[in-house]
Amino acid sequence: MDASRHEWLSATDAARAIAEGAVSSEQLIEACLARVRAAEPDVQAWQFLDPEHALAQARARDSDRREGRPCGPLHGVPVGIKDIIDTTDMPTEDGTVLHAGRTPDRDAAVVAMLRAAGAVILGKTVTTECAYFHPGKTRNPHNPAHTPGGSSSGSAAAVAAGMAPLALGTQTNGSVIRPAAFCGVYGFKPTHGLIPRHGILKLSRTLDHVGLFARTLEDIALLAEQLAGHDERDPDTRPRARIPFVRTAAEEVPLTPQLAFVKTPVWDRTATETRDAFAELAEALGAQCEEYELPDSLREAWDWHRTIMEAEMAMNLDVEWHKGRDRLSEPLHGLLARGREVKAIDYQKALARLPVLHEGFEELFTRFDAVLTPSAPGTAPEGLQATGDPAFCMLWTLCGMPALNLPLMQGGNGLPLGVQLVGARHGDARLLRTARWLVSRVQADSGATSEQGNPGSPVTPS
């Protein structure tokens, strides 16, 4: 095995190689750290990274394997952690000067799950300020003049640039799907409540989701299988049988999937090349793809999302408002100010619409296996003062439905153009299986024969 390419191993292949003794965790971490040294000056994905601490974790994992101790499914595999997710051995500063130097006294639930699965916590990835719109230092790995998206900017960029095979992010609006689309990797936002959020900066109980980044669908399934579960400290999780993500995602579809091509009421925000690309994709899918128009009543859903998000963020960041609002960015200051003015009746009305939304989409999913829609209006915008428009994520986040970015296309500027696939609530594993079918179908139609630079696989940044 070429030691110079260990950093581009998938998590699945890396875990297998470590278990078989073909490569050590220390070798893998050294390769990823070498890639960090090469790419980080341009990409700037990391908020905190201590190479010696990462290597110490890897050596401990290698010692466990040599001595015959139990090894988990992610044994020795590095994972990047968004810097709003608590880690006891690394700072968690939430992208704000108000939390500078903060080191939690316990791991977030998902970090504890990763450690139990044998993962190496490589470091903390850059987040926007309190996971809102004000960008951090991260650049797009494909072109540093363009945004990587946000708020999980560092996680998406680190995976795209080959610094880590896996990373965690969060989504309250479009903070997983959009950066995954802009950086050209797989990004998965599961059903609301599937993955526990205890120990993560709380913005909105109604809208907050944990999200996953990887360079392959198989790796998304592997990571999801380790993190889905009940945690009594997160009231939106519930006890459930273990979901066989890896097995289900790898299965052949029992029936050819039917996809609903949904433009949504914000279609006018799309770039011309996005419209053309999706028209071509829908045409290529033929009878398996049917355009589906959402009812006009759903036009208000974007306002409902905004009302809920602003009111709940204002409540959850009340301490930051009172102690340091003069040190907040203009976008976050404005959001919290608006949230403090939301009327209780408007907030309650918005919450009351959610059961109605759920019922309406249940009918859609009796006819279709998944919704096909853009991940973002276009490719990553040029400039680093904004993170892009989340409009194509808001409805699915509001409804708590599983969503997945597929790096299937490129724009005329050579940057990734993401395809979003949305599934029924609690149909997460089936969504991954449908996504695998779609990727295979697109690859077959395009005659793709190599892993890089073709539809259905991420484009490797220079």
Image (cartoon, rainbow, N blue to C red):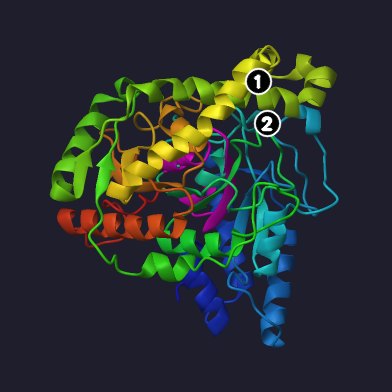
Q: Who's the residue at 45% across and 34% down the image? A: 357
**Is 180 colored magenta in this rendering?**
yes
- Front position in the image: 119 or 157: 119
Q: Helix, strand, or loop for circle 2?
A: helix
Is residue 364 rendered to the left or right of residue 22? left
Residue 135 percent location from the top left of the image: 58, 28
Q: Tell me the quarter of the picture where residue 101 sits.
A: top right
Residue 287 percent location from the top left of the image: 14, 49
According to the picture, the residue beneath numbered tag 2 turns out to be 130
Q: Who's the residue at 63% across and 33% down the image? A: 131
Q: Are marks 1 and 2 in contact (CB under 8 Å)?
A: yes
Q: Who's the residue at 51% across and 62% down the image? A: 7
Is residue 43 rendered to the left or right of residue 129? left
Crowdedness near tag 1: few (<14), some (14–19) or many (≥20) residues, C-alpha within 10 Å: many
- Magenta highlight range: 157-183
According to the picture, the residue beneath numbered tag 1 turns out to be 332
Q: CA distance from mark 1 to mark 2?
A: 8 Å
Crowdedness near tag 2: few (<14), some (14–19) or many (≥20) residues, C-alpha within 10 Å: many
